[in-house]
Amino acid sequence: MRASVLRTWRSNSEVIAGVDPWDVVDEAWAAMAEQGFATKGDFLPHALTVARNKAIDHQRRVEARRRDRSIDLPEAEEVPGSIGADVDYFRSREQIGAVGRLALWEEAIHEPGLLTELQRRVFVAVRIDGKSRAAVGRELDPPLTGQRVGQITAEAFIKLQRYVKRNEDRTLGAGRRGGAGHGG
């Protein structure tokens, strides 16, 4: 029955509007119990159909809520409360800072002359793509040990970290002033 719900939701672990697939299965069992488990045919296809229909009902309710929601008049229970304007302001500043730092890391990875091609390739494979050091080492020509790949990754990380720290004031300061410029 759970597979029937998941197939309807097009995912193997999706939660729709806070409802877990197992909750939908429980609803289906409860609905069938209310009817005394009466069916006109085989029980299994009937149970799968009930579960599928319950999943569709949840999807339709979510879609109806989305369509009915007014942009001008949000529902009070759906809008999170604000602790205060100052907290919201500083939270948004922190988010802007985090985005700026991520952009700096991306810039550093592709900065000409900062990393060797081997360092860039190894760092991206290990730290961004999440591959194991041993797997990355086997893919290189000539192959390297996982330990050596770890050393190369650490060297690249140190260079990138220095670049980010050196340029952080420039990038984050430009965002505070409202302009975007490069300085050193």
Image (spheres, helix red, strand yellow):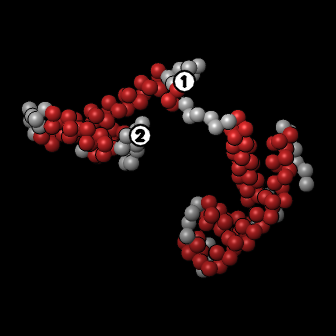
Residue corresponding to mark 1: 74
**Residue shown at 35%/33% (left/top)?**
58
Residue 97 vs 121, above or below: the answer is: above
Instruction: Say which of 178 and 103 sits in front.
Output: 178
Question: Residue 23 appears in which quarter of the rendering?
Answer: top left
Residue 150 vs 57, above or below: the answer is: below
Instruction: Say which of 76 and 125 sits in front.
Output: 76
Residue corresponding to mark 2: 18
Asked whether residue 173 appears in the rendered view, the answer is yes
Dots 1 and 2: beta carbons under 8 Å? Answer: no
**Residue shown at 62%/72% (left/top)?**
140
Residue 33 percent across, percent down from the top left: 15, 37
Number of marks:
2
- 44 lies left or right of 137: left
Question: Residue 166 appears in which quarter of the rendering?
Answer: bottom right
| Helix, strand or loop under label 2 | loop
**Residue shown at 41%/40% (left/top)?**
18
Residue type at tag 1: Pro
Sequence order check, earlier mark of 1 and 2: 2
| Helix, strand or loop under label 1 | loop
**Residue shown at 33%/38% (left/top)?**
8
Q: CA distance from mark 1 to mark 2?
A: 19 Å
Asked whether residue 110 appears in the rendered view, the answer is no
Neighbor class of circle 1 (other Cα within 10 Å; few <14, some 14-19, many 20+) is few
Instruction: Say which of 61 and 79 sits in front.
Output: 79
Residue 98 percent across, percent down from the top left: 71, 50
Question: Residue 134 appears in which quarter of the rendering?
Answer: bottom right
Residue type at tag 2: Gly
